[in-house]
Image (spheres, rainbow, N blue to C red):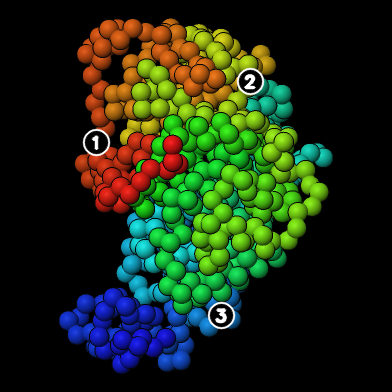
């Protein structure tokens, strides 16, 4: 594309486009462009191709990330869409994070991926960028990075995996992974059966097939207006997913031509729409952390108490595991996000702009008509009357904590019990299955040191296993409390994200086995029934040493990572100034 302000391409300025953008500093702009073109022509490009709008396409394929296993087909479809619309696609890699392959936890690497995404978008010439992600941390990392980079951007989701079948029962990762593992631990199924079901839980490439973190972030990306309409739900291996990819490529060219910046999409209204959707889908608790981090990149702080109030008037409508029954492929067959957004219409900001250049309301109105289906419920007949996530406060969590109430056991949501404390992951692993562990079904399991700095990286270990001897006796759920996260595919009466975390000296650090703890979800309370004086005495007797590291990424991580209420982002990556709070109280 010829830049009217720079027709010869010999000057480098902020309005430059295509290959003229962001020239490498050789001290001579004309030479920089000359050299750049010479090198890219080495790949066989013509001047006509290089004059088109340049669309960067982020390839996050990796042998360690089967959730992105359809990347070659997606790239081909995106390229087709870009070229049909008159652009030039240029593929480039960033790191990729596969949930179950990353040690100590994928969350430890999310911010690294966001930095890679941001800096490579910024460093290389492109007029718009297609972000291709799917597995849990990849979509948040890409949206965080793109939000900070600031150029026009569009998200393409890799799509969910297909469901499998085990002895006639539909199964899918990863709610059923946990369910079958629980049965195995309780001796309800044997070694042969657990091996057999292992072949069925992940029936194809793609992301987890329930409303886990990946599906949650896919829905959030669409609710934010960052995908084409219908971009959240098509499974990875379907023709629908490839058509979404082609449309995404074409739309990226339109974004580039209109210079529709990401700051026009990621507004306060968009974040409020996304929060509404997070609550209505019974979405992963990780969704709050990621949404907080993305909002932080745009200068918005998340008001957890306002989110809780929003939750009280937002029912869970999507009947997907772990809160409900179905899987993502069924959500897609039911019309996907359009069906949900239509049901939520009175609660949404319909004038929020999307990457299509139209508003969310216009997209809903332009979508095919609704039809009879049983996956997205009407507001008059919800799965759960309130939003999936409630925010708790109390002396155990002065900075707040959360619980996914829609996936909790109703009888345990008002509960007082004796604490059984594990100091860290190693302590839990060593003792939880011991026959002589002093634990009863009505006790409250407490795990310390799995917060952002504690483990580090806030691993998804908040879903403490039921102690083996209780599991064998038929116990399926207990109140469990930690400063960590849990997988969006998990379920149970589980209090998470306790702030401040124990590794920072929060009250959680000073809970002892035998203390009484009270949980009241109706009162939004999480209390340690120990006096302030006794807590202060324990703090003095056992001062906490905050973890540090000598070098490398771990040092950067431990020095700069924030708590869950700031999205577990690095403090220096958030926007330099706060422009508002979301949702509005
Ligand atoms: Fe990648 Fe679940 S492991 S989405």
Q: Position of residue 264 (x, y in %)?
A: 43, 61
> The residue tagged with tag 3: helix, strand or loop?
loop
Q: Which mark is residue 85?
A: 3
Please count the marks in the image. Answer: 3
Identified at 40% across, 54% down, the residue is 144
Q: Which mark is residue 548?
A: 1
> The residue tagged with tag 1: helix, strand or loop?
loop
Whether label 3 touches label 2, CB < 8 Å: no
Looking at the rendered image, the quarter that the N terminus falls into is bottom left
Report the residue that reaches farthest toward the left: 27
Per the model, the C-alpha gap separating discs 3 and 1 is: 51 Å
Disc with the residue nearer the chain's start (3 vs 2): 3
> Ligand 1 near label 3 (Cβ, under 8 Å)?
no
Quarter residue 471 falls in: top right
For residue 456, side relative to residue 166 (left or right)? left
Q: Residues within 10 Å of mark 3 (few under 14, many from 20)?
A: some
Along the line of sight, which residue is nearer the eye, 283 or 546? 283
Disc with the residue nearer the chain's start (3 vs 1): 3
Identified at 71% across, 24% down, the residue is 188
Identified at 29% across, 28% down, the residue is 504
Per the model, the C-alpha gap separating discs 1 and 2 is: 40 Å
> The residue tagged with tag 2: helix, strand or loop?
helix
Q: Which mark is residue 181?
A: none
């Amino acid at each position: 594309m010829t830049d009217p302000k720079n027709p010869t391409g010999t000057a480098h300025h902020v309005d430059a486009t295509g290959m003229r953008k962001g020239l490498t500093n050789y001290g001579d702009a004309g030479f920089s462009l000359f050299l750049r073109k010479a090198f890219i022509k080495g790949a066989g490009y013509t001047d006509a191709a290089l004059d088109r709008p340049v669309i960067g396409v982020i390839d996050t394929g990796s042998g360690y990330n089967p959730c992105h296993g359809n990347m070659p087909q997606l790239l081909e479809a995106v390229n087709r869409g870009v070229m049909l619309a008159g652009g030039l696609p240029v593929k480039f890699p960033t790191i990729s994070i596969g949930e179950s392959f990353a040690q100590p936890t994928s969350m430890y690497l999310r911010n690294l991926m966001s930095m890679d995404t941001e800096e490579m978008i910024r460093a290389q010439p492109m007029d718009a960028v297609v972000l291709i992600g799917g597995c849990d941390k990849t979509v948040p990392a890409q949206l965080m990075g793109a939000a900070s980079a600031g150029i026009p951007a569009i998200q393409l989701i890799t799509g969910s995996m297909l469901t499998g079948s085990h002895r006639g029962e539909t199964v899918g990762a990863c709610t059923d992974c946990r369910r079958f593992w629980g049965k195995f631990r309780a001796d309800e199924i044997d070694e042969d059966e657990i091996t057999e079901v292992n072949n069925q839980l992940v029936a194809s490439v793609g992301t987890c097939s329930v409303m886990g973190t990946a599906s949650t972030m896919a829905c959030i990306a669409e609710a934010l207006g960052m995908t084409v309409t219908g971009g959240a739900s098509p499974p990875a291996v379907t023709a629908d997913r490839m058509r979404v990819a082609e449309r995404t490529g074409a739309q990226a060219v339109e974004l580039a031509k209109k210079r529709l910046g990401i700051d026009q999409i990621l507004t306060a209204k968009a974040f409020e729409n996304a929060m509404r959707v997070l609550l209505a889908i019974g979405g992963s608790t990780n969704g709050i952390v990621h949404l907080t981090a993305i909002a932080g990149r745009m200068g918005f702080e998340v008001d957890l108490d306002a989110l809780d109030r929003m939750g009280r008037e937002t029912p869970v409508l999507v009947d997907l595991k772990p809160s409900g029954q179905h899987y993502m492929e069924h959500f897609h067959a039911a019309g996907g996000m359009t069906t949900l957004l239509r049901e939520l219409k009175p609660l949404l900001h319909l004038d929020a702009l999307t990457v299509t250049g139209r508003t969310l309301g216009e997209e809903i109105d332009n979508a095919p008509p609704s039809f009879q289906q049983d996956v997205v419920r009407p507001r008059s007949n919800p799965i759960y009357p309130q939003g999936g996530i409630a925010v708790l406060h109390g002396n155990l969590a002065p900075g707040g904590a959360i619980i996914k109430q829609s996936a909790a056991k109703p009888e345990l949501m008002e509960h007082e019990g004796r604490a059984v404390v594990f100091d860290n992951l190693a302590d839990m692993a060593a003792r939880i299955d011991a026959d002589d562990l002093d634990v009863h079904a009505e006790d409250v399991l407490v795990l310390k040191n799995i917060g952002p700095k504690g483990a580090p990286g806030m691993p998804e270990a908040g879903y403490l296993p039921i102690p083996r001897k209780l599991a064998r006796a038929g116990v399926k759920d207990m109140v469990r409390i930690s400063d960590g996260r849990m997988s969006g595919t998990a379920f149970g009466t589980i209090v998470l994200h306790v702030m401040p975390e124990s590794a920072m000296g929060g009250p959680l650090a000073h809970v002892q086995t035998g203390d009484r703890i009270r949980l009241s979800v109706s009162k939004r309370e999480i209390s340690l029934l120990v006096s302030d004086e006794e807590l202060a005495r324990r703090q003095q007797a056992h001062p906490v040493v905050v973890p540090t590291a000598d070098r490398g990424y771990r040092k950067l991580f431990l020095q700069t990572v924030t708590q869950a209420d700031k999205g577990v982002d690095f403090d220096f990556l958030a926007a330099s100034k706060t422009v508002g709070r979301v949702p509005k109280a």
